[in-house]
Image (cartoon, rainbow, N blue to C red):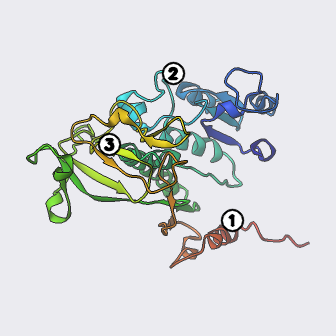
């Protein structure tokens, strides 16, 4: 489908789905090599951050950036902890890098362009209940929006729309304060006025916490998920794996976290065939700025978002002679 449409710039992970089935690591069921097909169609291939920077200077106007065989690593793993699969893919660009590269290429045309930027790992880390990674991803997404706003400041005919495709059943309910007395971690959870303010710092002013394992940190909780152990702590060794399969192919709590001091067992409330939290039907926020933004107002059905975009981009206009 992507090859049929041929967007000028395609950046992300998932290279395993572009390779023919006979190529090691491929997840395709046919022998089509879509990387080769894209290259034959005039695309410059980039497989890491350095190659992406080089590709933006080739003036081909078309870039295929595939920086991971599967899901790209989170900002927390990529930039700070060097965990996940960073050792295997050490030079992945971030969402800000990719947004800047895409805007740089697409803005060369005088006819205008459409760019979709997704902070996909916010969702991918909310599923396994890995709140610290999801929150750092949200910061990175906010920075990508900032890049778009900077572009719009010098290109006032730009419409920016920011929203989510769904919600998760999760909320910030307070903080965890390690300095509270006792050994039970749940007794260190502060709610309402007792929550206090987290003591994250940002000494280098990069917009990210200098460290996430501070003594008083945000505490998030989900209203759904599989059996798991709540540790009340960031997962510094790599993304959280809350549940694993047993011999019956049922997902049970991952005992790798059982002996973390103060960890508590949380009984799941989804079928045992599920290994992670699920989406929720809560309303999501949509914010917009620029020409056409006035069309987004009040409570809107999802399909009406599409109508505003179509009208703003004049996609439904018929040319008459």
Name which quarter of the figure residue 316 lies in: bottom right
Nearest to the observer: residue 72 or residue 63: 72
Q: Would residue 93 be found to the left or right of residue 113 on screen?
A: left
Ranked by sequence position, the earlier of labels 1 and 3 is 3
Residue 235 is situated, as x and y percent measured from the top left of the image, at 34, 37
The percent position of residue 20, horizontal first and vertical second, equals 77, 27
> Sequence order check: which comes first, mark 2 or mark 3?
2
Number of residues whose C-alpha sits closer than 10 Å to that of mark 1, classed few (under 14), some (14–19) or many (20 or more)? some
As drawn, the label of residue 313 is 1
**Res 59 seen here:** no
Q: Nearer the viewer, residue 143 or 111?
A: 143
Badge 3 local density, few (<14 within 10 Å), some, or many (20+)? some
Work out how far the residue at label 2 is from the one at label 3, CA to CA, in angstroms. 24 Å
In the image, 267: left or right of 96? left
Q: Secondary structure at mark 2?
A: loop
Instruction: Choose mark 1 or mark 3, whichever is in front.
Output: 3
Q: Which residue is mark 2?
A: 88
Q: Which residue is mark 3?
A: 208
Residue occupying image coordinates x 75% and y 66%: 315
Graded by Cα atoms within 10 Å as few (under 14), some (14 to 19) or many (20 or more), the crowding at tag 2 reads few
Q: Secondary structure at mark 3?
A: loop
Q: Position of residue 162 (x, y in %)?
A: 51, 60
Query: How much space separates mark 1 and mark 3, taking CA atoms?
Result: 35 Å
Q: Identify the residue at the far right of this view.
A: 321
């Amino acid at each position: 489908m992507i090859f049929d449409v041929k967007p000028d710039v395609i950046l992300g992970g998932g290279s395993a789905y572009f390779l023919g089935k006979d190529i090691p690591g491929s997840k395709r069921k046919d022998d089509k090599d879509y990387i080769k097909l894209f290259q034959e169609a005039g695309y410059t291939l980039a497989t890491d951050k350095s190659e992406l920077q080089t590709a933006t200077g080739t003036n081909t106007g078309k870039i295929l950036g595939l920086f991971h065989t599967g899901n790209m690593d989170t900002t927390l793993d990529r930039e700070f902890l060097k965990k996940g699969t960073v050792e295997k893919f050490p030079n992945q660009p971030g969402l800000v890098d990719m947004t800047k590269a895409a805007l740089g290429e697409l803005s060369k045309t005088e006819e205008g362009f459409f760019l979709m930027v997704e902070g996909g790992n916010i969702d991918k880390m909310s599923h396994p209940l890995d709140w610290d990674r999801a929150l750092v991803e949200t910061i990175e997404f906010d920075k990508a929006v900032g890049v778009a706003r900077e572009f719009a400041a010098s290109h006032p005919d730009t419409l920016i729309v920011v929203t989510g495709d769904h919600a998760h059943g999760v909320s910030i309910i307070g903080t965890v304060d390690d300095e509270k007395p006792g050994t039970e971690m749940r007794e260190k959870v502060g709610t309402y006025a007792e929550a206090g303010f987290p003591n994250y710092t940002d000494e280098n002013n990069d917009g990210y916490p200098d460290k996430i394992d501070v003594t008083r940190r945000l505490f998030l909780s989900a209203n759904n998920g599989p059996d798991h152990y709540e540790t009340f702590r960031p997962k510094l060794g790599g993304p959280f794996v809350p549940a694993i399969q047993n011999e019956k192919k049922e997902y049970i709590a991952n005992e790798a976290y059982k002996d973390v001091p103060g960890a508590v067992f949380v009984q799941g409330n989804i079928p045992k065939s599920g290994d992670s939290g699920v989406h929720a039907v809560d309303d999501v926020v949509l914010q917009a700025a620029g020409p056409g933004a006035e069309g987004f107002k009040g409570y809107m059905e999802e399909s009406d978002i599409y109508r505003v975009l179509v009208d703003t981009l004049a996609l439904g206009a018929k040319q008459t002679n």
